[in-house]
């Protein structure tokens, strides 16, 4: 079974500063994908970034980057130049890649608050 | 990206009644859809996997007779909460992808349905 651990229930960051949201995972499957989703108060799930287990380089998407350390089984999200609109819940998730259609398994989430 | 639409966005019902929530893939066919439940200030928990043309697969602890799932076509899955009670009040959200694990393997989510049982 897969497990995602997010140990930071809440984080505060000053506007324009960078922030790192922690995520560790556990799986015995060699092929998987790691995802970060943002959930504002409206409830919608917004896809931010993806990292494949065989990817050699860390993923980047605009202000988002994923610090992937496979040996440590960690996939931390780095948000640079924080904006007030970044205030939301952030979920780390994993999806096993096999022959079937597999679901996402989510961590408990981190609530990020950006301070002006 | 692919679009998943969910309806209704929110619903209020009386205890003991049944509520149906629809999840549609608008621009792709989905043989599999996933239903999640999210209680306030908690994470998304997988309830069941909906398979087109066959029975849904439920996660441990999820009552099959209470949460009826029907995946009658390649673009529509429905979740019916039968004899709803206040403890069923939650945010229900569905997700799907065009292929089994395309490209990034991103799952696309519906807007979610907020159920309040009085």
Image (cartoon, coloured by chain):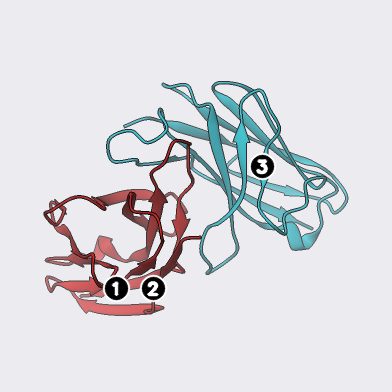
Quarter of the rendering containing residue A64: bottom left
- C-beta proximity under 8 Å, tags 3 and 1: no
- Categorize mark 3 by other alpha carbons within 10 Å: few (<14), some (14-19), many (20+): some
Image location of residue A45, percent across then percent down: 41, 50
Q: Quadrant of residue B101?
A: top left
User: Residue A28, relative to residue B33: is it above or below?
Assistant: below
| Marks 2 & 3, CB-CB < 8 Å contact | no
- The residue that appears at 12% across and 70% down in the rendered structure is A16
Closer to viewer: mark 3 or mark 1: 3
Chain red in the figure, letter: A
Which mark is on residue A5? none
According to the picture, the residue beneath numbered tag 3 turns out to be: B57
For the residues labelled 1 and 2, say whether their Cβ atoms are less than 8 Å apart.
yes
Give the label, 2 or 3, closer to the camera.
Answer: 3
Judging from the image, mark 2 belongs to the subunit labelled A
Residue B73, image x, y percentages: 61, 20
In the rendered view, does A36 fall on the left or right side of B22?
left
In terms of depth relative to the viewer, which is nearer, A104 or A56? A56
Residues behind callouts 3 and 1 on a single chain: no
Find residue B89 and report its horizontal and vertical position in percent: 70, 58
Locate the C terminus of chain B and report the quarter of the image it occupies.
bottom right
Label 2: element kind = loop
Q: Is residue B52 left or right of residue A16?
A: right
Q: Secondary structure at mark 3?
A: strand
Q: Which numbered disc covers residue A6?
A: 2
Q: Residue at x 46, y 61 (%)?
A: A2
**Side of A84 where B25 appears, left or right:** right
Q: Which of the chains bears the disc numbered 1?
A: A
Is any part of residue A18 visible from this angle?
yes
Quarter of the rendering occupied by the N terminus of chain B:
top left
| Residue with the mark numbered 1 | A22
Chain represented in cyan? B
């Amino acid at each position: 079974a897969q497990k995602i651990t997010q140990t930071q229930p809440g984080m505060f960051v000053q506007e324009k500063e960078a922030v790192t949201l922690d995520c560790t995972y556990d799986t015995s499957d060699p092929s998987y994908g790691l995802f970060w989703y943002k959930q504002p108060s409206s409830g919608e799930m917004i896809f931010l970034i993806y990292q494949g287990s065989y990817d050699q380089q860390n993923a980047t998407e605009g202000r988002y980057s994923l610090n992937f350390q496979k040996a440590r089984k960690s996939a931390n999200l780095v948000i640079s130049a924080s904006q007030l609109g970044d205030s939301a819940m952030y979920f780390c998730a994993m999806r096993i890649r096999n022959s079937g259609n597999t679901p996402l398994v989510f961590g408990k989430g981190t609530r990020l608050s950006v301070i002006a | 990206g692919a679009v998943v639409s969910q309806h209704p966005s929110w619903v209020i019902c009386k205890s003991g009644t049944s509520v149906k929530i629809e999840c549609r893939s608008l621009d792709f066919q989905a043989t599999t859809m996933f239903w999640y439940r999210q209680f306030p200030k908690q994470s998304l928990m997988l309830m069941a996997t909906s398979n087109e043309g066959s029975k849904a697969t439920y996660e441990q602890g999820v009552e099959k007779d209470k949460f009826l799932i029907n995946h009658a076509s390649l673009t529509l899955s429905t979740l019916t909460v039968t004899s709803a009670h206040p403890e069923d009040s939650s945010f229900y959200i569905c997700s799907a992808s065009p292929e089994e694990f395309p490209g990034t393997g991103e799952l696309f989510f519906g807007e979610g349905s907020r159920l309040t049982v009085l």
